[in-house]
Image (cartoon, helix red, strand yellow):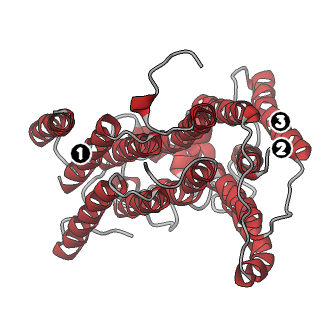
Amino acid sequence: MIFYIGSGLLIGIGLYGMLYKRNLIKIIIGLDFIETGVNILIISLCYVKGGTAPIFSLPSLKPSQMVDPLPQALVLTAIVIGVAVLAMALSIVVRIYDKRKTMDISKLKRLKW
Amino acid sequence: MISSICAPSIYILIIVLVLFMSVGAIFALHLRDLLSAVIVMGVVDLIAAILFLILQAPDVAITQAAVGAGLTTAIFVIAIVRSTRKEK
Amino acid sequence: MKRLFAILFPLLIIIVFLYIMKNYIPFCVDRMVVAKHYLTEGLPETGSTNIVTSIVVLYRGFDTLGEVTVLFLAALGFGAILEGAKKKTKEIVASPIVRISTRYLFPFIIMFGVYIFLHGHLTPGGGFPGGVIIAAGILLMYLAYKDFRIDHTKFKITESLAGIIFVGIGLVGLAIYGSFLANFLPEGLPRQIFSAGIIPLIYIAIGFKVGSELGGLVGEGLEDKE
């Protein structure tokens, strides 16, 4: 249950950062927090009481005492795609700073360059 | 590594880690110096990697540590070097 | 006013979320329906002792192909959007401690990354963290020496060849068995390095692809634009 509270707090703080902050870098930091929070939530749904990692490292491990391996494969993909999204967003931020010399989104009101 | 999360010592460790993560997340959005904010964000990602290890997921923990502490911080520092470092 | 709304809206979402999770989705409950088949039949069918690896490469291998495509598009877009930026970056000068220790640490970092993606079917890890560690090693060389430049042409050729090899292995499986990414190599004994069918080959291809892609991305961001 503590894991749900932790991931919920992280998603909430990321949402607050994306809604309230005016600097472009802080908005993208909030986006990263939301992605990390959702990954923690997905992994915490697959824990079995008294389970161990799903790797047959010793010959005496039985499949009945392992945690669920399927959400771990999903989160492995999701982490890498999070990096891809962050790289694209930050390249757009660098171009906006070159054109307008400001990092404040309340001053970027015109649609035309 | 067969262990139980409901043992009291591990439960206190998880509560302390979640507390550090939330306080760090609030600080990362509040600091004026953008480089310090990015470093605190790297620490939050590393604490998430420790939580993945407690939940018995070593593949995901290695990937999150490598990506969160290495590559995401590096890409943010590239963006800060090409723009301003101080907010306002 | 805006701050009040920005605090109340996430708080509302957190409260509703925790209420639903407490009453309807309990913690520590066994919910495995499909994964039971993967856990009991995974080792005899595929031969790899790491079940997460066999899911990522063999049982759900098409999603990994989609992820590799998304990463390729992101690196392409990063380079394309940053092409017209005209600011000269600041000089990064490192102290002698960083320079001397980087000269001795860089080969070991590359070797560690190769070890992680080569043993993907035996120990935790796999192709993606191995490639990221190689890119972190290249970043360390960029930060330590200010005259270090990578050859972008060679990195792009390596990345494209590794992607073609991945799709090529899938097509060979299509030719022999009639389905894309079928396992056509013998399984071998568990816990050996030459086992588990096509999993080591695909992870070597993914490791090279991700490593050269992210290394090129970091190099593109840190070089001066005239």
Against C161, residue C105 (above or below) is below
Circles 3 and 2 in contact, beta carbons < 8 Å: no
Work out whether residue C146 or residue C122 is closer to the camera in this orientation and state it: C146
Q: Could you tell me residue B60's position as x and y percent? A: 48, 53
Percent across and percent down for residue C192 are 69, 62
B1 relative to C169 in the view: left or right: left
Q: Single out the mark in the foreground, 3 or 1.
A: 1
Residue visible at 49% across and 54% down in the picture: B64
Residue type at tag 2? Glu
Task: Give the residue displayed 35% in from the left and 37% down from the top.
Answer: A18
- Front-most of residues B13 and B58: B13
Task: Give the amino acid type for the residue marked by disc 1 in the picture.
Answer: Gly
Camera-nearest label, 2 or 1:
2
- Mark 1 is surrounded, within 10 Å at the Cα level, by few (under 14), some (14 to 19) or many (20 or more) other residues, namely many
Q: Amino acid at mark 3?
A: Ser
Do residues under tags 2 and 1 come within 8 Å of each other at their CB atoms? no
- Determine the chain carrying the residue at label 1: A
Q: Quick one: SS at disc 2?
A: loop
State the SS at label 3. Answer: helix
In the rendered image of this protein, does residue C106 appear above or below residue B63?
A: below
The answer to whether residue A106 is visible is yes
Residue bearing mark 3: C160
Which residue is tagged 1? A8
Is C184 left, or right, of C42 in this rendering? Answer: right
Q: Please name the residue that numbered disc 2 is placed on.
A: C226
Left/right of residue C85 with respect to residue A71 in the rendered view: right
